[in-house]
Amino acid sequence: MKKVLIGAAVFVAAVAALRRFGPALGERAMRMCEAMFDRMPADFPPKRMLRGIEEIREQNTQILRRLEEQEEEEHRPTALAAGV
């Protein structure tokens, strides 16, 4: 019984410590990963992949902007439609 109580106390203490320090440890790990990624060469495949993703996002934004402009042009009344 005593071992169970000690085990439960250790478990509760570990959970409390993780809840308290877990987010800070996660942020620190992310900063370390970002720093390591920044030190890698420009032609490193993951960096090239991320650049490609950024380019695709920019292209998608341009395409969506053009589509919105076309829709606006289609819904605008023209001089002929206004009866001028």
Image (cartoon, grey):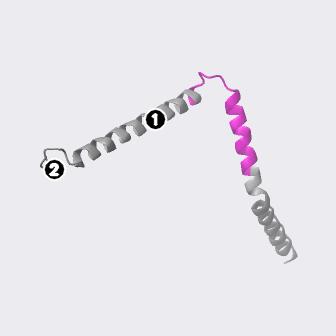
Number of other residues with Cα within 10 Å of mark 2, as a class: few under 14, some 14 to 19, many 20 or more? few
Residue at 47% over, 31% down: 55
Nearer the observer, disc 2 or disc 1?
Answer: 2
Q: Position of residue 29 (x, y in %)?
A: 73, 44
Residue at 40% over, 36% down: 62
* 43 left or right, relative to 40: left
Residue at 71% over, 32% down: 36
Residue at 84% over, 75% down: 5
Q: Secondary structure at mark 1?
A: helix
* 15 left or right, relative to 48: right
Q: Position of residue 6 (x, y in %)?
A: 86, 71
For disc 1, the marked residue is: 58
- To which quarter of the image does residue 41 belong? top right
The residue nearer to you, when weighing 45 against 59, is: 59
On screen, residue 43 above or below 64: above
Number of other residues with Cα within 10 Å of mark 1, as a class: few under 14, some 14 to 19, many 20 or more? few
For disc 2, the marked residue is: 82
Q: Secondary structure at mark 2?
A: loop
Residue range in magenta is 26-46
Outermost residue toward the bottom in this view: 1
* 33 left or right, relative to 20: left
Q: Position of residue 65 (x, y in %)?
A: 37, 41
**Residue 45 magenta:** yes
* Main SS of residues in magenta: helix
Q: Amino acid at mark 1?
A: Glu
